[in-house]
Amino acid sequence: GRQPVLTGLGLALLAARAAGIVIIDGVYNDVKNLDGFLAEVEQGRQMGFDGKTLIHPGQVEGANAGFAPSEQAVEDARGLIDAFESSTGGVVTYNGKMVENLHVESAKRTLAINEAILALG
């Protein structure tokens, strides 16, 4: 597993976010182990990576599915942005949760990723 390198991965993620750059998770070498690959894609997405370096064509579909925002995530991002932008001040909530600038930025990033994927065809 990746337990020994999780601290390093987390620090790299923090540095990338602070610098405003994209960060891609490393390769998964066992190209015949689809379950292991998909588990690492999910872990990388949850950690905050923007994508995954691939070494085999059989990994493309799983990586694309794992890193693309779901329809629900896109809908939530739009709703959160709308709630924030239509606010007249004070505390803004969306689906019962407080909304701050960082949530809006994250929602905008979700929409940008979705738009980029849709533009691919």
Image (spheres, rainbow, N blue to C red):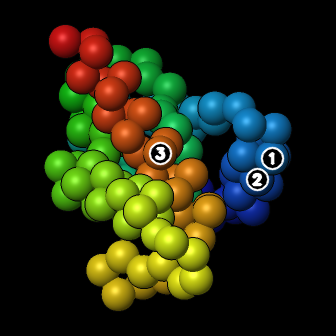
- Mark 3 falls on what kind of element? helix
Q: Specify the label residue 14 is tagged with.
A: 2
Percent x, y of residue 105: 57, 52
**Type of amino acid at the residue the image marks with label 3:** Lys
Residue 15 higher or lower than 85, as above or below = above
Q: Dot 3 corresponds to which residue?
A: 108
Q: Residue at x 58, y 82 (%)?
A: 90
Label 1 or label 3, whichever lies nearer to me, is 3
Q: Residue at x 41, y 63 (%)?
A: 86
Q: How much space separates mark 3 and mark 2, taking CA atoms?
A: 19 Å
Percent x, y of residue 27: 52, 31
Q: How much space separates mark 1 and mark 2, taking CA atoms?
A: 6 Å
Q: Are marks 1 and 2 in contact (CB under 8 Å)?
A: yes
Q: Nearer the viewer, residue 92 or 6?
A: 92
| Label 1 neighbour load within 10 Å: few <14, some 14-19, many 20+ | few
Residue 117 quadrant: top left
Q: Residue at x 46, y 58 (%)?
A: 85
Q: Nearer the viewer, residue 104 or 52?
A: 104
Q: Specify the label residue 18 is tagged with.
A: 1
Q: Nearer the viewer, residue 82 or 95?
A: 82
Label 3 or label 2, whichever lies nearer to me, is 3
| Label 3 neighbour load within 10 Å: few <14, some 14-19, many 20+ | some
Q: Could one spot residue 40 in this view of the protein?
A: no
Q: Earlier in the sequence, mark 1 or mark 3?
A: 1
Q: Could one spot residue 51 in this view of the protein?
A: yes
Q: How much space separates mark 1 and mark 3, taking CA atoms?
A: 17 Å
Label 1 or label 2, whichever lies nearer to me, is 1
**Type of amino acid at the residue the image marks with label 2:** Leu
**Type of amino acid at the residue the image marks with label 1:** Ala
In the visual, does 67 lie left or right of 65? right
- Mark 1 falls on what kind of element? helix
